[in-house]
Amino acid sequence: DIQMTQSPSSLSASVGDRVTITCRTSQGISNYLAWYQQKPGKGPKLLISSASALQSGVPSRFSGSGSGTDFTLTISSLQPEDVATYYCQKYNSDPWTFGQGTKVEIK
Amino acid sequence: QVQLVQSGAEVKRPGASVKVSCKTSGYTFTIYDINWVRQATGQGLEWMGWMNPNRGNTGYAQKFQGRVTMTRDTSISTAYMELSSLTSEDSAVYYCAIGRSGYYYFDYWGQGTQVTVSS
C-alpha cells in the first residue's frame, strides 16, 4: 500500500501568518489528493480535491498544490477560526488512505 | 439538501458486535457509494470500506476483512456497518461519508457515532 506522510504533526502560528502543511506519498498518485479540515468535536470537512481545486464556500486563503508524490496545503493568512486538524487523503487507488493529520493552533 | 444521519452512541462488551446505521436524504440513495471511516479518540482518520447501494457490492480495507459487513436497505435509504469481535481498540467515532464526484474523496459526512468497547 502507498504510505502517506504528513508534516509537521502540529504547528503554532500567529494570526495573519502564512501556514504550510506538507503531504508526501510513497508512490506517485498524480493529483488524486484531497485535504480536509476537522475542528474539535466535529466531523471532517472537505476543503480541496484534485490537489488544488477549492471546494465551494471554502475561503480563498486556503490553497493546495502539488502532483506526483509531494503536496502542499497553504493558509495564506491564518485566522482564529482555522484552528483545526488538517488531513490529506489519497484517492487514486484502494485503500483510500489518510495522512496522520496536522494540528494547527494559534500562538 | 444532502444529509447523512447516523444512529446513536453504543456501548459494547469485548467480543460483541455493533451495527451502526446511516440514513440518507436529499439525493437518490443508489447513486453514490457509502464509505465508512473511523477515528479513535485523539487519533487520525481510518478508512474502513465502501458499499455500492445500487448493487450492494462492497470493498473492505484489509485490516477489517472478515470482521466488517456493510449492507443497505434501499427502501429507507439507509446504509449499515456491522463490526464484529470487538476489542477496546475498536472504541472510536464511526462516520459514514459519500463523494458525489465519482472519485473516492468525501464531500458529505454523517455526524459520527461513538462506539465504546468496555468490559
Image: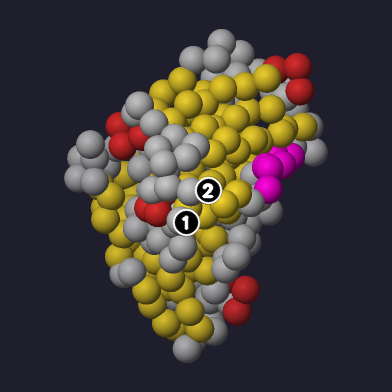
Q: Is residue A29 above or below residue A25?
A: above
The local secondary structure at tag 1 comes to: loop
Q: Amino acid at mark 1?
A: Ser
Which residue is pictured at 49% across the width and 37% down the height? B17
Q: Is residue A19 above or below residue B23?
A: below
Observer-nearest residue: B42 or A44? B42
Q: Residue B23 colored magenta?
A: no
Same chain assignment for discs 2 and 1? yes
Chain letter belonging to callout 1: B
Residue range in magenta is: B3-8
Decide whether the magenta segment is chiefly helix, strand or loop: strand
Residue A103: x and y in percent read: 43, 70
Which residue is pictured at 54% across the width and 32% down the height? B81
The N terminus of chain A sits in image quarter: top left
Q: Are marks 2 and 1 in contact (CB under 8 Å)?
A: yes
Q: Residues within 10 Å of mark 2 (few under 14, many from 20)?
A: some
**Any part of residue B45 in sight:** no
Residue A38 located left or right of residue B27 = left
Q: Which residue is mark 2?
A: B12
